[in-house]
Amino acid sequence: MSLVKTSKNGNVIPAVFSDFFENDNFFNNRWFDRDIEQWLPAVNVKENGNEFKIEFAAPGFNKNDFKVHVEGNLLTISAEKKEEKSEEKEKFTRKEFSYNSFSRSFTLPQSVIADKIDAKYTDGILKLHIPKKEEAKVLPSKEIKVA
């Protein structure tokens, strides 16, 4: 094992640094842009005879961080959380901040009652209940006697 390597441009550099600095993919690494990407929470959409249920896994938010908006047949759920911490002691200052947000939209079918949508946020899960119109509900099967 050599302690030095010759770089692509002919310079001799210590081997311990060559893998780090010569890696063409270093700055294309997903580690650098993971915080830049918009984070989208995991979503479950369920349907039963009376309603649709949408569940968002969105821990770390408060219920006031969410906005649920219906315009026409488009349901949009978004959240935004900004947090800033500052600490000052003797000869140093530390300031940290974080920002999380997401926005998801769903096209609602004509069979729902948009003005009766209910949303609750508990234990990191945002749950929406979207009731169906009476005529859209699945009626139980019924046997008809033949006369």
Image: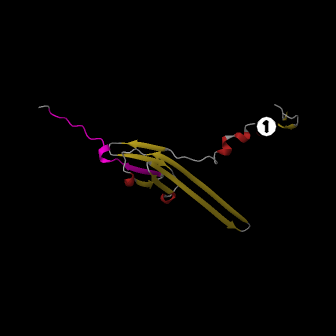
Q: Quadrant of residue 90?
A: bottom right
Q: Given the current orientation, which residue lies at the most extreme left position?
A: 147
Q: Nearer the viewer, residue 63 or 3?
A: 63
Q: Given the current orientation, which residue lies at the most extreme front position?
A: 72
Considering the image in quadrants, where does the N terminus appear?
A: top right
Q: Nearer the viewer, residue 114 or 28?
A: 114
Give x and y (percent) for residue 14: 84, 38
Q: Is residue 111 magenta?
A: no
Q: Is residue 146 above or below residue 71?
A: above
* Residue under the image location 42 percent in, 46 percent down: 108
Q: How is the image coloured?
A: secondary structure
* Residue under the image location 62 percent in, 46 percent down: 37
Task: Residue type at mark 1: give it.
Answer: Glu
Q: Quadrant of residue 111?
A: top left
Q: Nearer the viewer, residue 86 or 147?
A: 147
Which portion, as a residue range, is magenta? 125-145
The residue to which callout 1 is attached is: 22
* Residue under the image location 83 percent in, 32 percent down: 2
Q: Is residue 82 left or right of residue 27?
A: left
Give x and y (percent) for residue 132: 34, 47
Give x and y (percent) for residue 69: 46, 54
The mark total stands at: 1
* Residue under the image location 24 percent in, 37 percent down: 141
Considering the image in quadrants, where does the C terminus appear?
A: top left
Secondary structure beneath dot 1 equals loop
Mark 1 surroundings within 10 Å by alpha-carbon count, few (fewer than 14), some (14 through 19), many (20 or more): few
Q: Is residue 144 magenta?
A: yes
Q: Nearer the viewer, residue 102 or 58?
A: 102
Q: Given the current orientation, which residue lies at the most extreme bottom position?
A: 90
